[in-house]
Amino acid sequence: APSGLSLEDLREAALAAGLDPSYVTRAVAELDSVPDKERTLLGAPVEVVRQRIVPGTLTDDTWASMVDAARAHFGETGIAGQIGHLREWTLQTGTGNGNRTVTRLSAEPTEGGVRLLLTQSIRETVKAFSLATGIVSVMMVLFTVLAAAGVDPELWVAVGIMAVMALGFGAGSQLWARWWSADRSGQFDALLDRLELVTRASSDADQTSVSHAPPAPNAPLLDLDRLGDAPEAETSGETRRRERS
């Protein structure tokens, strides 16, 4: 929001101008969000980041539904936790530091609704491939020097094999990382669409329950005991009139 103006001020100004205040809320949320980012390592994408702000309220039931959707999407249980208003679901797949993929889904309330952040990193995997490429390249240079010095002519065969291995590790990791980045970007957008539907459905359910709540009584309730005494009082009055006559 501009300096000196709160979100409520902008909503009131929009309402005075005949505009729907919800459009102002959505616009401020989009301005407040950071763009999607793609982190790289040696030119290869190693982390996909997707962020979206969706309208609604972050409740325990809404977060539980989000976690269920994420587990169904990835086919893994993961671990859900909460720190203050920030809720996070983390999933680690693979074994060892060299073949580990870390996926995180976080949700936190914001002025425009709920901020969703979805990330996945293959930094350790790409780092392992890069390290293998470096080791094979060093050995290839060493064998090339030995072969050029005439130590053993058959070393040229080993040099050729290592050149193919270095090319395979280097180019293969680059191509695979780019394919992974494009694939995960599409999957993350689809998952965020699903999470947005979950948030909207929960918000609509809350509004429906509030609208169907019984209204508070504005008038005192009738006293059934006094109503029960009314016929008796009327009968007594008729008896007195008969006695006078």
Image (tube, grey):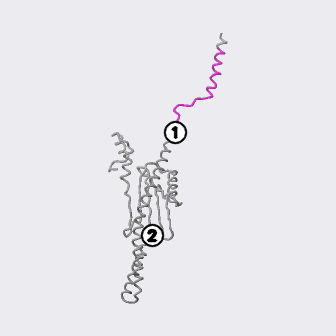
Please identify the quadrant where the C terminus is shown. top right
Q: What residue appears at the point 38 percent right and 61 percent down from the top-left corner?
A: 37
Q: Nearer the viewer, residue 36 or 32?
A: 36
For disc 2, the neighbor class at 10 Å (few under 14, some 14 to 19, many from 20) is many
Contact check, label 1 and label 2, Cβ < 8 Å: no
Task: Identify residue for label 1.
Answer: 212
Q: What residue appears at the point 35 percent right and 45 percent down from the top-left corner?
A: 10
**Does 133 sit above or below residue 243?**
below
Per the image, is 231 magenta? yes
**SS class of the residue under badge 2?**
helix
Left or right, 23 with respect to 62, comes to left
Percent of width and height locating residue 88: 48, 58
Task: Identify residue for label 2.
Answer: 125
Give whichever of discs 1 and 2 has the lower sequence position: 2
Quadrant assignment, res 237: top right
Give, as a three-letter code, the residue at label 1. Answer: His
Magenta range is: 214-240
Q: Main secondary structure of the magenta part?
A: helix
**Does 22 sit above or below residue 115?**
above
Mark nearest the camera among 1 and 2 is: 2
Percent of width and height locating residue 149: 36, 89
For disc 1, the neighbor class at 10 Å (few under 14, some 14 to 19, many from 20) is few
